[in-house]
Image (cartoon, helix red, strand yellow):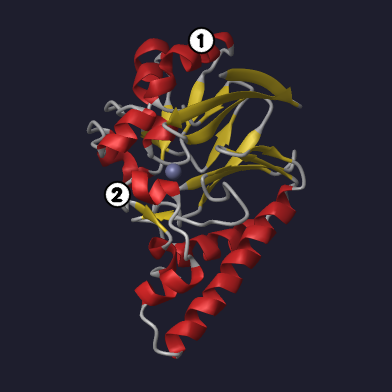
């Protein structure tokens, strides 16, 4: 499924990606020629048409996960435009991504590409974006802030107000610090890679921070009572979500508990 719409000067592309009964939404944004994240390789047929229709002249990647960078190689080969990525993730980007089968089926493999480190600010003809470090979801994650418009492009740092599972390499303590840092910025509208355009985005990010801090308080309290992180996980998250089963444990609620 594909949908294209517009929020002020931002062109929004929306797709669904499914694996069995598990479905994820993908949102891509084009602002004055700047594409923010590329979507996965699996959506090439649909997303390449979207790219060609929207005169893209530069690409900013929030992070290297294959659902955000899977089409970077296509853009590099077909449009010969600069692709920016967190400096520390560049060596990994130059190698083809290797993933478990469920990720290959869900997103497709990410081909190798050659990104450039971000400049301090990204400029288009009309807009200026501050490029802000925001580790947590991954260590090397960036968000893009257009302060004159009150826009914040959040990659995967928000996604949902309540997080029930995390990937094996996520760090929730870092997510808390990143959310606190972002909430000090001036913005209203959040552009999320999986949840779309969120008006009153500051309240949304605050809700997620409050949830994480509350959860952290519960985890610390149970640790003081002598429970192990495994026991705390069973107590706070008694239901095992589908993605935890499909991913063979790469995604789990334990990954949240252990890093809080
Ligand atoms: Zn991600």
15 or 35: nearer the viewer: 15
Say which residue label 1 marks. 49
Task: Look at the picture and state if 213 lies above or below 14.
Answer: below
Which label's residue is closer to the chain start, 2 or 1?
1
Element class at badge 2: loop
Rendering coords of residue 58 (x, y %): 50, 24
Element class at badge 1: helix
251 or 28: nearer the viewer: 251
Answer whether residue 184 is visible to the viewer in this image: no
Q: Nearer the viewer, mark 2 or mark 1?
A: 2
206 horizontally vs 229: left or right: right
Tell me the quarter of the image containing the N terminus.
top right
Rendering coords of residue 161 (x, y %): 63, 54
Q: How many marks?
A: 2
Q: Residue furthest bottom?
A: 225
Task: Look at the picture and state if 81 lies above or below 65.
Answer: above
Numbered label attached to residue 248: 2
Whether the residue carrying mark 1 lies under 8 Å from ligand 1 is answered with no
Q: Residue at x 41, y 46 (%)?
A: 243
Q: CA separation, marks 2 and 1?
A: 34 Å
Quadrant of the displayed image that contains ligand 1: top left
Tell me the quarter of the image containing the C terminus.
bottom left
Q: Residue at x 43, y 84 (%)?
A: 223
Rendering coords of residue 186 (x, y %): 73, 52
């Amino acid at each position: 499924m594909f949908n294209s719409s517009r929020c002020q000067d931002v062109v929004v592309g929306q797709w669904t990606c499914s694996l069995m009964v598990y479905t994820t939404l993908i949102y891509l944004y084009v602002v004055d020629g700047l594409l923010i994240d590329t979507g996965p390789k699996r959506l090439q047929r649909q997303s390449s048409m979207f790219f060609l229709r929207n005169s893209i002249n530069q690409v900013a990647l929030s992070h290297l996960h294959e659902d955000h960078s899977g089409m970077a190689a296509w853009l590099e080969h077909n449009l010969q435009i600069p692709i920016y990525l967190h400096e520390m993730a560049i060596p990994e980007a130059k190698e083809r991504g290797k993933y478990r089968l469920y990720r290959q089926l869900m997103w497709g493999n990410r081909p190798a590409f050659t990104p450039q480190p971000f400049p301090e600010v990204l400029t288009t003809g009309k807009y200026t974006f501050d490029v802000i470090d925001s580790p947590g979801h991954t260590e090397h994650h960036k968000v893009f802030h257009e302060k004159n418009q009150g826009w914040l492009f959040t990659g995967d740092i928000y996604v949902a107000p309540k997080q029930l599972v995390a990937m094996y390499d996520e760090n929730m303590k870092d997510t808390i610090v990143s959310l606190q840092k972002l909430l000090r910025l001036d913005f209203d509208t959040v552009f999320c890679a999986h949840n779309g355009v969120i008006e009153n985005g500051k309240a949304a990010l605050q809700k997620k921070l409050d949830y994480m801090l509350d959860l952290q308080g519960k985890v610390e309290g149970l640790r003081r009572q002598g429970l192990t992180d495994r026991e705390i996980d069973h107590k706070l998250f008694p239901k095992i979500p589908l993605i935890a089963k499909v991913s063979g444990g790469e995604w789990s609620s334990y990954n949240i508990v252990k890093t809080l």
